[in-house]
Image (cartoon, grey):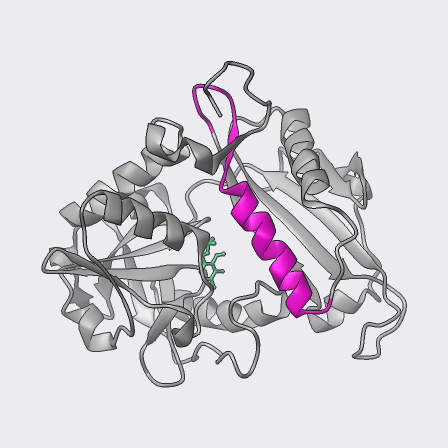
Amino acid sequence: MSFDQSKWVWRNGSIVPWEDATTHVSAHALHYGSGVFEGMRCYETADGPAIFRLEEHLDRLYQSATVHGMDIPYTCEELTEAICELIDRHDFKSCYVRPLCYYGTSSLSLHPARCPLEVVILVWPWAPYLGAEGLEHGVRVTVSPWKKFHSEMMPTTAKASGQYINSVLAVREAVSRGFDEALLLDVEGNVAEGSGENLFVVKDNQVFTNDERHSILLGITRDAVIQIARDLGYEINIGPISLTDLLKSDEAFFTGTAAEVTPIREVDGTLINNGERGPVTKEIQSAFFAATSGRHQRYRDWLTYVVPQTVAGIH
Ligand SMILES: Cc1ncc(COP(=O)(O)O)c(C=O)c1O
């Protein structure tokens, strides 16, 4: 990925040139990871660019901020307007959107009391996170020696900057051994999630995923896929997933805003569905992309158009 096409950043209420959106080296967040953020995707549709599940992402941003004692000085409507304006200004047909609220410069005491809360939004085009090839043929995954932190150590359902060092360690280690992605177990030894994705497995035509009791971020894509799979007639089972469940599954896939719906074709040398994307994964993936591109009428409410639709009945 690159920021080559990003020309502006929304910062604390106004749009500024990309190169001016700098922060001082004494910023609290740079030292301690004291920020909360979101990641969402804006997709190309026949009615112009539309952000997938914007409301849910902003809800989670405010929830993450609350958990970390931050008071975001902008309303949800203001951030929605800012995001749409920034995408429109870039004229992007599709892109990734990254709002970030972080403590800036004032003091490096651990308690950020006097530090100003900075709010920024970045947008850039971002190809499929685990590769277009990965979307079609699946990715190779390894179980990480790093465990996913438990919710008693840090709030797992919030999306805070500092906690991502756990994911960074895991993905670096996985890639250094030639894998595409890491799979983290929870402290009890069950499967938690990927470094930036939730996990689903398919067995005997039933779909399984875990929940926050297994130290996962409650993904918005996960939620969309649960709804899509139910609508397609699959039974969804939510509960612990052991490594054996995964290794013996008929199919497995990751979900996430960045990774979308990516099949898993191998876990540490064990092939899943003979190393190919499985039929259930393919069906769910097709419905997901129909939803993100506005081709699936049932899920039109999940889209926020960057330029509001005026034709009656679109919203
Ligand atoms: C650790 C982790 N788990 C799961 C997800 C998937 O969440 P979502 O579908 O909301 O992007 C993400 C991505 O944000 C993540 O970083």
Q: Does 66 appear in magenta?
A: yes
Q: Looking at the picture, how far across and down is residue 61, in whole percent? A: 62, 55
Asked whether the viewer can see residue 296, the reply is no
* Towards the viewer: 2 or 192: 192
Q: Is residue 255 above or below residue 65?
A: above
Furthest residue in direction bottom, as rendered:
188
Furthest residue in direction top, as rendered:
311
Q: Quadrant of residue 272?
A: bottom left
Q: Looking at the picture, how far across and down is residue 103, in whole percent? A: 78, 63
Q: Write down the region rendered in magenta.
A: 44-69
Q: Does 150 appear in magenta?
A: no
Q: Is residue 108 left or right of residue 210?
A: right
Q: How many marks?
A: 0
* Residue drawn 38% across the image and 35% down it: 299
Q: Quadrant of residue 192?
A: bottom left
Q: Looking at the picture, how far across and down is residue 65, in whole percent? A: 67, 62
* Residue drawn 90% across the image and 67% down it: 106
Q: Quadrant of residue 190?
A: bottom left
Asked whether the viewer can see residue 103, the reply is yes
Q: Is residue 16 above or below residue 195?
A: above
* Residue drawn 56% across the image and 67% down it: 164
Q: Looking at the picture, how far across and down is residue 255, in whole percent? A: 36, 53
* Residue drawn 67% across the image and 64% down it: 66
* Towards the viewer: 249 or 139: 249
Q: Is residue 22 left or right of residue 128?
A: right
Q: Is residue 40 left or right of residue 256?
A: right
Q: Is residue 77 above or below residue 59?
A: above
Q: Is residue 284 above or below residue 92?
A: below
Q: Is residue 76 left or right of residue 215?
A: right
